[in-house]
Image (cartoon, rainbow, N blue to C red):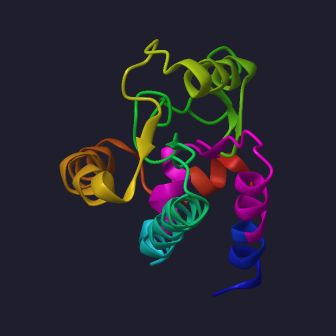
Amino acid sequence: MSGSIKRFERIVSLAYGNDIDLYIYFSPAHARLYEAQCIVGRWFTIEDMKREVVKIVEDQAKNSGVDPYPVWEFSGCNTVTVETVPVENDSENMMNWYREGSHYTRETAKLILDKIPSGSEVISDFGVKKILKNIYAIYESSVIPTWKRTRRSLNNCDSYSKRSGD
C-alpha cells in the first residue's frame, strides 16, 4: 500500500472515530485527459486506485460500526467531462464546464457542491455514488460503453496536447 493510500486510510479512520463529516469525490478532469491516460496504459491504474479508496471507506466504516461515507465519482465520461473542446485559436467559443483539461469552472464546482449533500439531479449522469457492491456494475454498464462512444467522438490525444500547450 502506497504512502498516499495509507495517509488516506488514516484520515478516514480519524474522521469516523471523531464523528466528522467527510466528503470524498473524484474530481472531474476533461475526458480527453482520461483518454490520454488510457492510451498510455494508466487508466486501469486510476480505476484500481478508485476501487481502493472505496474499499478503505467501507472497511473503515465497518470497523467503526457506522454507515460508510459516500464516495462520489465525477470523473470519467459524462455530459460535463465530454464537453466539446473549441478548435485551436478559437477565442469566441469558450467551454462551459472547463477552463482547460484539468481545471473546471465555477459552474462545474457548483454542480459538485449541489450534488454531494443533496443528490441534486441537475445533470443526471454527472456524479454517481460508488460502493463496492456497485462499482463493477457501474464499470461494466456505464464506463466501458461510454468510453467506447467517447473514444470515437473525441479527437486524438496529439491534437489535444497541441491545444493545451503540453
Q: Is residue 166 visible?
A: no
- Residue at left offset 53%, top offset 42%: 70
The image shows residue 90 at horizontal and vertical percentages of 65, 25
Q: What stretch is highlighted in magenta?
A: 10-37
The image shows residue 16 at horizontal and vertical percentages of 70, 53
Picture layout, residue 2 above or below residue 29: below
Picture layout, residue 93 above or below residue 127: above
- Residue at left offset 45%, top offset 78%: 41
The foreground one among 77 and 112 is: 112
- Residue at left offset 51%, top offset 71%: 52
Q: In which quarter of the image is residue 56?
A: bottom right
Whether residue 166 is in magenta: the answer is no
Q: Residue furthest front?
A: 65
- Residue at left offset 37%, top offset 21%: 124
Q: Is residue 57 visible?
A: yes
Whether residue 28 is in magenta: the answer is yes
The image shows residue 110 at horizontal and vertical percentages of 68, 18
Left or right: where 11 falls relative to 79:
right
Q: Residue furthest bottom?
A: 1
Which quadrant is the C terminus positioned in? bottom right
Marker count (numbered): 0
The image shows residue 157 at horizontal and vertical percentages of 50, 59
Which quadrant is the N terminus positioned in? bottom right
The foreground one among 21 and 109 is: 21
Q: In which quarter of the image is residue 146?
A: top left
